[in-house]
Amino acid sequence: MWRDWALVAVLVPVAILEGLLRDNLAWRPFALVLGVLPVFTLLWRRTNPLVVVALAFGAHAAADLPTLFGAEHSAMLGTNAFVILLPYSLFRWGSGREAATGMAIMGGGHLASAVVTSVHAVEVVFGIGFLMFLAALGASVRFRASSRLRGTDQIKLRERELLARELHDTVAHHVSAIAIQAQAGSTLAASDPKAAMEALGVIEKEASRTLAEMRILVGALRQGEEPDLAPQRGVADIERLARNAGDSPRVDVELSGDLDGLRPSVEAAIYRLAQESITNAVRHARHATRIDVRVVGDDGAVRLSVRDDGDASPFGAGSSSGYGLVGMAERAKLLGGTLEAGPAPDRGWTITAVLPRNGTPT
């Protein structure tokens, strides 16, 4: 990274000047090599921290060799202090095995240098403690970065689930209506051209609405652009789901009770649940002629009931192969509500959802 290059660009000239101008320095050419070359290993401290630790601390220990041969001073430059960055780098970017090995190298090198230079035991303990502090700092930063990354991944996963549910709830409903009207139109084309034309009109309308919904979803996924979002659908829009055309089951909608002042999230959820329930009934209720949608509001909750008069729908038993009921149950649960689905006592299939008016999860 540029910070590592900047660090090298500063330390190399300083090390050269120190090696040339400092008086109390043994084996000057040797000191220049040990002071300059290890600085370049900082460029790999993020990708190969253990190798950098081994090279840098090896050079650090080798700088004490002149004292073993009777020299008054060592060959260590002040710029060799950059090794204090390495415990942080080791625990920030290295694996667990690399961290353990690197700490052994650093500790051994520090003790060997202390023995050669006859450093006091207190200074040795202080030095090892300082290395441990830097290592703990690197581990802490790594943990925080990993936590942020996991949080970001969870947010992305949640957004994907929401988009998938919205795509399923919105587009599937319109496409089902298009398919049903197309079947009705092909059946009535010869015997009742006028009814066939009406079916084509419904198809055109549903296709336009599907395209508009898709553009909204795609616009929300574009980066760097503000999507042109349509108003959020609410309880009042459920009446638009009523229909009585072609061979499709008739959909009757009834709204009653106190439905004013609902939170937007609750209104949107009720609309989507009703829409998906109708789609499920149209798709899976065999021989159904009527679908009744009832929305009732009171002081504490909003109740949605969708019931068809067809044969017992296989949708509930086979929900593991699709995402309809699973997504509906999740949507209700997120707002602190409940959703139940199953065959009616006499005939057909019933879906009942109850959501709190304030949409607060329980």
Image (spheres, rainbow, N blue to C red):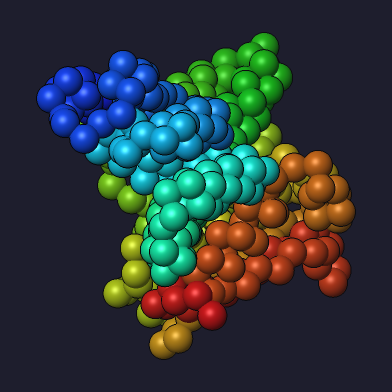
**Quadrant assignment for the N terminus:** top left
> Looking at this view, is 56 or 310 the one in front?
56
The residue positioned 34% from the left and 63% from the top of the image is: 264
On the picture, is 16 further left or further right than 118?
left
Q: Residue furthest bottom?
A: 299
The residue positioned 57% from the left and 20% from the top of the image is: 196
Q: Residue 326 location, x and y as percent? A: 69, 54
The residue positioned 46% from the left and 32% from the top of the image is: 69
Image: 222 above or below 353: above
Residue 337 in view (yes/no): yes
Q: Residue 62 location, x and y as percent? A: 47, 31
Image: 264 above or below 200: below
On the picture, is 74 further left or further right than 49?
left
> Looking at this view, is 226 or 169 the one in front?
226
> Looking at this view, is 168 or 68 the one in front?
68
Residue 227 in view (yes/no): no
> Looking at this view, is 136 or 262 the one in front?
136
Q: Residue 112 location, x and y as percent? A: 53, 47
**Quadrant assignment for the C terminus:** bottom right
Q: Residue 269 location, x and y as percent? A: 48, 59
Image: 244 above or below 132: above
* Count of marks, rendered view: 0
The residue positioned 42% from the left and 69% from the top of the image is: 122
Image: 132 above or below 225: below
Q: Residue furthest front?
A: 70
